[in-house]
């Protein structure tokens, strides 16, 4: 039982990070009906941004290592850099094709993903880089053999805080109301005086910033940064968004947690070789049993 509880804790940690990435997928799809397959690579760029910001702070004499304050500075800087990248991706790659067929947008998203990976390889090299230990690991809670480290607690807590902040933005602010209006009917929202371009750009910025936050948090447990590090987390977060009901914020959070727990459980009680295979198994099951996801609304066609 204690082993199960420990695996559950570990799964919730990874699931919290997947949930943050999945929120970017689900928000963009809710606004544009676009699967932004470059989102995982924005996550990768966010990790590199946090890495270099940490390096610059260290060179400037800031005590980055084992400092939660400077770790927060690095994360906020990475979120800002990734948000700016998301803005330019939407403005340069997706906006000119907004009225194009969906297949064109899908191919463009894959092209942007490959472009970012190759740019990262050219600029940063293909060798893994080690992320500095921003926060020293220590056990803050132990019940029997079940332990919770401070790093794990920070990942879960920050993910919850960011998810709650997103809820406040979407439901309590004017830009959030505009996002919901554009998601419901883009043309009607434009007729009501809402700047659709501004709303879509803000959605990309917000989703990209959350992906960078997830990258910085995951670096606490997995401190290696590579140009292809966003492929698997991006894929798993996409499946999490589909599982929860893509376009639904609550669904993305729930799907991310389920994905994290399922992945850790299959490794703990099965084999690590099935760690990535569980992603496709869950995707196939969801598409067969409930294509709209756990929280998705059934799609009805008008006569």
Image (cartoon, helix red, strand yellow):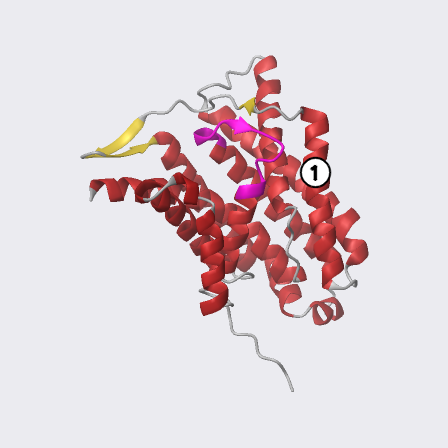
Q: Position of residue 100 (x, y in %)?
A: 79, 62
Helix, strand or loop at disc 1?
helix
Tell me where residue 193 sits by quadrant. Answer: bottom right
Numbered-mark total: 1
Where does residue 93 sit, x and y in percent of width and height?
77, 49
Q: Is residue 230 magenta?
A: yes
Q: At 67% from the left edge and 24% from the top edge, which residue is drawn? A: 125
Q: Which residues are magenta?
A: 219-232
Residue farthest along the bottom direction in this orientation? 303
At which x and y percent is residue 121? Answer: 68, 29
Q: Quadrant of the N terminus?
A: top left
Point 73% across, 40% down: residue: 115
Q: Is residue 194 above or below residue 11?
A: below
Front in this rendered view, residue 29 or 157: 29
Magenta span includes 229: yes
Q: Quadrant of the C terminus?
A: bottom right
Front in this rendered view, residue 180 or 118: 118
- Which one is in front, 33 or 31? 33
Position of residue 75 relative to residue 275, above or below, is above
- Indicate the position of residue 197 as horizontal and vertical percent values: 74, 56
Residue receiving disc 1: 116
Q: Is residue 250 visible?
A: no
Q: For residue 114, what is the image quadrant?
A: top right
Q: Is residue 148 visible?
A: yes
* Rendered view: 131 above or below 283: above
Residue shown at 68%/31% (left/top)? 120
């Amino acid at each position: 039982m204690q082993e199960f509880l420990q695996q559950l804790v570990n799964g919730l940690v990874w699931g919290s990070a997947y949930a943050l990435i999945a929120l970017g997928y689900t928000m963009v799809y809710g606004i544009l009906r676009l699967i932004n397959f470059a989102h995982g690579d924005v996550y990768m760029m966010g990790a590199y941004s946090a890495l270099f910001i940490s390096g610059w702070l260290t060179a400037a004499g800031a005590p980055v290592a084992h400092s939660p304050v400077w770790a927060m500075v690095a994360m906020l800087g990475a979120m800002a850099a990734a948000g700016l990248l998301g803005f330019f991706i939407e403005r340069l790659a997706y906006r000119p094709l907004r009225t194009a067929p969906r297949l064109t947008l899908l191919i463009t998203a894959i092209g942007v993903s490959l472009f970012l990976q190759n740019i990262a390889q050219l600029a940063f090299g293909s060798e893994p880089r080690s992320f500095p230990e921003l926060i020293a690991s220590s056990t803050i809670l132990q019940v029997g053999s079940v332990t919770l480290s401070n790093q794990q607690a920070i990942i879960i807590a920050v993910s919850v805080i960011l998810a709650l902040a997103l809820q406040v933005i979407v439901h309590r602010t004017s830009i959030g109301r505009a996002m919901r209006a554009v998601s419901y009917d883009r043309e009607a929202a434009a007729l009501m005086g809402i700047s659709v371009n501004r709303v879509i750009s803000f959605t990309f910025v917000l989703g990209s910033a959350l992906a960078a936050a997830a990258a910085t948090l995951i670096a606490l447990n997995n401190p290696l940064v590579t140009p292809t590090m966003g492929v698997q987390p991006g894929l798993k977060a996409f499946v999490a968004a589909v599982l929860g009901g893509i376009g639904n914020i609550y669904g993305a959070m729930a799907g991310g947690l389920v994905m994290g727990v399922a992945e850790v459980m299959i490794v703990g009680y099965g084999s690590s070789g099935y760690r990535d295979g569980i992603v496709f198994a869950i995707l196939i099951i969801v598409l067969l049993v409930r294509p709209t996801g756990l929280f998705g609304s059934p799609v009805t066609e008008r006569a």
